[in-house]
Amino acid sequence: MKYKALFIIPVCLLVVACSTNPSATTYSRDQTLSVQQVQLGTITSIRQVQIEGTQSGVGAAAGTVIGGVAGSGIGDGRGSTIAAVVVGVAGGLVGDKVENAVTKKDGLEITVQLDNGNAISVVQEADEIFQVGDRVRLLTSQGTARISH
C-alpha cells in the first residue's frame, strides 16, 4: 500500500502544478484571434495585492486518495477502514489548502486615468513592471481587462 501512495503523490502534484492562471502576458486559447478594444491612459496608482489560489478540487481529491491509502495501512479489518476514512478526510482538507497555497499569485491593483477622462482599476498578476506615471494601454475583450505597456 505504501508504494501506491508514492506513485499517487507525484501525479497529483503534477496536475496541480500544471493548472494555469491567465495573467497580463498570458492568453488562453479562447482569447487568441479575438478583437480587443484599446484605450490609452496614465497610471495614477499601484497597489500590491494577493490573488487567491485555485480551488479546483484536484488538491482535495489528491489529498483524500493519498490519505485514504496511507490510512488503510493502519490497523487491521474494521480499524483499517475507519483509519482510511478519517485520514482520507484529513488528507482532503490538507490537499485543498496545499493547492490554494501553491497556486496563489502576487498581483497588482493598477489605477489608470484614461485619455477619455474616465478612471479605471484592474487587478492582474504582477508579471510586468509598472510605475506611477507610465503611459499604458487598457485592453478589454469579453469582460476581460489587462493593462500593458
Image (tube, rainbow, N blue to C red):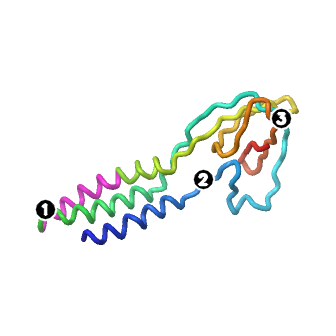
User: Which region shows up in magenta?
Assistant: 77-93
Q: In which quarter of the image is residue 110?
A: top right
Left or right, 54 with reference to 109: left
> Could you tell me the amino acid type at mark 1?
Gly
User: Dot 2, crowdedness within 10 Å: few (<14), some or many (≥20)?
Assistant: some
Q: What residue sits 41% from the left and 65% below the top?
A: 10
Q: What residue sits 42% from the left and 56% below the top?
A: 59
Residue 131 lies within the magenta run: no
Cα–Cα gap, marks 1 and 2: 42 Å
Q: What residue sits 79% from the left and 58% below the top?
A: 34
The residue tagged with tag 2: helix, strand or loop?
loop
- The residue that mark 1 highlights is 79
The residue tagged with tag 3: helix, strand or loop?
strand
> Could you tell me the amino acid type at mark 2?
Asn
Cα–Cα gap, marks 3 and 2: 26 Å
> Could you tell me the amino acid type at mark 3?
Gly
- The residue that mark 3 highlights is 41
Left or right, 137 with reference to 21: right
Cα–Cα gap, marks 1 and 3: 66 Å
| Relative image position of residue 147 (x, y in whole percent) | 75, 42
The circle on residue 21 is 2
Q: In this view, does 14 lie above or below 26?
A: below
